[in-house]
Amino acid sequence: MEKFNGIRYNSRWDSSTWLIIAITMVCCVIPCFLDDGIGPIIICPMMLVFIIVTFRSVYYKIDGDRLVVYQFFIPTAYPIDKIKEIRKTKSILSAPATSLTNRLAVTFTERKVLKSSMPLIISPVRREEFISHILSINPDIMVNLDNRTSSFFLLKRRPPRSTHNNHVRFHPGDKWMTEKAVRSFLHVFSPAQGYFSI
């Protein structure tokens, strides 16, 4: 098994994660009161441990130009230069994501990357930092973090060592802008130049 380095981003644990664990605990406790045998006492805690270990085995790494997704501690690497879009999703399908409410859908430019038409669904902690890290490697990725409307802005970041004095190009027709970029836009946007600094 290939070993990967890079920055690690755990999968987010939120109220939906703890709700699943709580439901599992209830399902484990009830049989212990309904059956006098030792079977439920052994099997139910094992199920609970299995779910917790499964959740803990899901995390992500960005190693060079690869996004590495770990599930059951087994890594799968995806090329960041093949990512087309990152958007917020409410999908509850089974995926390497421990959160049900804070998920991102990653779409690739080529179907053969996932061997499926479905996007890769993940739920990293430090979401803004995670996306910024991805964009520093591939600034052409479209990012949409709001599903309520399509009339939002997109900030396409340039890599940190840009030859454009770290200026970030502003695209009025796209769909996402960070809070930091909004503040910069309000204060130092220059219509003549068409860009602003962060």
Image: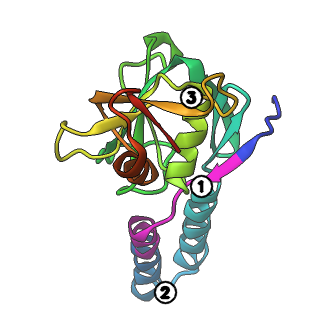
Tags 3 and 2 touching, CB below 8 Å = no
**CB within 8 Å, label 1 to label 2:** no
> As displayed, is residue 11 above or below residue 140?
below
Residue at x-position 58% and y-position 80%: 38
Q: Mark 3: few, some, or many residues within 10 Å (few <14, many ≥20)?
A: many
First in sequence, mark 3 or 1: give its number: 1
Disc 2 target residue: 36
Magenta residues?
8-22
Between label 1 and label 2, give the one nearer the viewer. 1
Element type at mark 3: loop
Q: Secondary structure at mark 1?
A: helix
Q: Nearer the viewer, residue 137 or 42?
A: 137
Image point 43% across, 88% down: which residue? 33
Above or below, comparing residue 112 to residue 44 in the picture: above
User: Going from the N terminus, do you reach mark 3 or mark 2 first?
Assistant: 2
Label at residue 15? none
Q: Residue at x 58, y 74 (%)?
A: 45
Q: Is residue 159 magenta?
A: no
69 w.r.t. 54: above or below: above
| Amino acid type at mark 1 | Thr
Q: Amino acid at mark 2?
A: Asp
Secondary-structure class at tag 2: loop
Q: Quadrant of the N terminus?
A: top right
Q: Which mark is residue 158?
A: 3
Q: Which residue is mark 1?
A: 54
